[in-house]
């Protein structure tokens, strides 16, 4: 029984190290999203290429950390006698001694906070990129269609007014 408890504590210690790595990875992701938005706004192609290279370089280390986390999750599920799909930090927390429980709870709260922040930043980045794509689409359509679709404006009463000028720029003064 004592050997099983030592094994579980050893696996929990390893899991805490893996979770620390996940936390660092999420922090890096937040910084990369900020850098991506900044580079897109500044139209800095060199910075975007550097960012892409950085992301590609770190992909393998993240995959290794992910597989290590899944292996530890499986080992802990087996040691605690539960199904791997049901092994969560909350379930693990409920079966640990107080000092380990506090460490796992701390990591869980930190991860939850970072993930919520990452979701918010991801949404902001997605919205920026969507607006850039929409603007580029409108710009390209106006350049290559040469005004065939016309410009839609609205009058004070809400009626649409379509301008069908064939020129891109009005040169009248």
Image: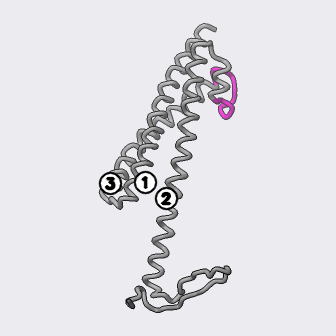
Is residue 25 shown left or right of residue 163?
left
Q: Residue visible at 55% across and 33% down?
A: 111
Q: Nearer the viewer, residue 95 or 68?
A: 95
Q: Nearer the viewer, residue 42 or 14?
A: 42
Which is more N-terminal, label 3 or label 2? 3
Quadrant (top left, top right, bottom left, bottom right) of the N terminus: top right
Secondary structure at numbered mark 1: helix
Q: Which residue is mark 1?
A: 37
Residue lying furthest left = 46
Residue 155 at what x, y percent from top left? 62, 82
Is residue 66 shown left or right of residue 92?
left
Discs 3/1, front: 1
Work out how far the residue at label 1 is from the one at label 2, CA to CA, in angstroms: 7 Å
Which region of the structure is painted magenta?
Answer: 78-88
Q: Nearer the viewer, residue 64 or 28?
A: 28
Residue 10 at what x, y percent from top left? 52, 17
For mark 1, does the 10 Å Cα neighbourhood hold few (<14), some (14 to 19), or many (20 or more) residues? Answer: some
Residue 148 at what x, y percent from top left? 51, 89
Residue 128 has which mark?
2
Is residue 51 shown left or right of residue 95?
left
Residue lying furthest top = 2
Secondary structure at numbered mark 3: helix
Image marks 2 and 3: residues in contact by CB distance under 8 Å: no
Image marks 1 and 2: residues in contact by CB distance under 8 Å: yes
Q: Residue visible at 58% across and 34% down?
A: 112
Q: Nearer the viewer, residue 157 or 89?
A: 157
Q: Which residue is mark 3?
A: 47
């Amino acid at each position: 029984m004592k050997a099983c408890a030592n094994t579980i504590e050893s696996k929990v210690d390893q899991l805490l190290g893996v979770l620390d790595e996940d936390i660092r990875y999420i922090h890096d992701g937040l910084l990369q999203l900020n850098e991506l938005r900044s580079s897109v706004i500044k139209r800095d192609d060199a910075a975007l290429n550097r960012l892409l290279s950085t992301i590609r370089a770190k992909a393998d280390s993240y995959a290794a950390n992910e597989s290590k986390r899944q292996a530890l999750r499986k080992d802990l599920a087996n040691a605690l006698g539960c199904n791997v799909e049901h092994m969560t930090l909350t379930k693990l927390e409920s079966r640990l001694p107080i000092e380990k429980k506090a460490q796992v709870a701390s990591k869980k709260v930190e991860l939850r906070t970072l993930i919520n922040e990452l979701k918010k930043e991801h949404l902001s980045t997605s919205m920026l990129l969507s607006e850039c794509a929409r603007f580029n689409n409108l710009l390209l359509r106006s350049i290559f269609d040469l005004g065939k679709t016309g410009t839609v404006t609205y009058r004070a009463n809400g009626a649409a007014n379509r301008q069908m000028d064939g020129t891109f720029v009005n040169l009248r003064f």
